[in-house]
Image (cartoon, rainbow, N blue to C red):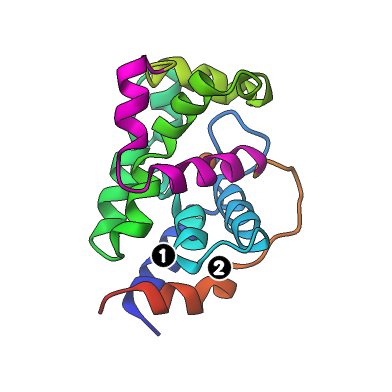
Amino acid sequence: MSKVYQEIEKIFTTGIAEEYLGEDVKLVEHMLQCGDLAKSAGAPDYLVIASLLHDIGHLLVDDALSAQDAGIDMHHDVVGAKWIEERFPSTVSEPVRLHVAAKRYLVTTNHDYLSKLSHASVQTLYMQGGPLNQDEVVEFIAREGAEDAVRVRLWDDQAKVRDKQTSVLADFKEAIDSLTRS
Ligand SMILES: [Fe+2]
């Protein structure tokens, strides 16, 4: 069994009870739902794993919930991407790094998008800087992994269904093993 898979398994197991900051699902459940949505959409393995791991930053930071209550942005996108880039190719880490910026991009460029966001997600949007300006839109879309980040983001927004049956982490093991450098 690969070392990286074991690390992820430990993080998911330890964080199993972790709440997802004001949402109706637990965080780990949300991440599994997101990975499943990417898989059902026929996404390549790197993007399925980016979707599965996109919120891992929340599980790596102590006390994410009280930070949010206090209005502090813990930058889980950056924390997660940093952890991932030490273990996976940039095709996996960059969409994770940009998945919060992708929300800001979508709010700016797609008028219906904001109305589809959950209450908690609208709340954090402003903590995360709100809509992008025109220069930032151009800058965002030119970054590595930006388009993939938008795809992850759209699955992310849908992956909040209470009591939905999901895959288990082991179902992603083969893809994780094939992507990890060891
Ligand atoms: Fe998420």
Q: In terms of depth relative to the viewer, which is nearer, 83 or 44?
A: 44
In the picture provided, is 28 more to the left or to the right than 66? right
Badge 1 element: helix
Number of labels in the image equals 2
Residue 42 forms part of the magenta stretch: no
Q: Magenta span covers which residues?
A: 132-158
Identify the element where label 2 is drawn.
Answer: helix
First in residue order: circle 2 vs circle 1: 1
Quarter of the rendering occupied by the C terminus: bottom left
Q: Amino acid at mark 1?
A: Ile
Q: Is residue 88 visible?
A: yes
Label 2 – label 1 distance at C-alpha: 9 Å
Q: Residue at x 40, y 73 (%)?
A: 5
The quarter of the picture where the N terminus appears is: bottom left
Residue identifier under label 1: 8
Q: Is residue 153 left or right of residue 57?
A: right
In the image, residue 123 lies at what x, y percent?
52, 17
Percent coordinates x, y for residue 126 in the rendering = 44, 14
Q: Count neighbours of disc 2 (C-alpha within 10 A) and say few if under 14, some if 14 to 19, many if 20 or more.
A: some
Is residue 73 visible in the rendered image? The answer is no
Task: Say above or below: 76 vs 33.
Answer: above
Per the image, is 140 magenta? yes
Q: Quadrant of residue 114?
A: top right
In the image, residue 10 above or below residue 101:
below
The verdict on label 2 being within 8 Å of ligand 1 is no
Q: Which residue is mark 2?
A: 169
Tell me whether the residue at label 2 lies in contact with that at label 1, contact meaning CB atoms closer than 8 angstroms.
yes
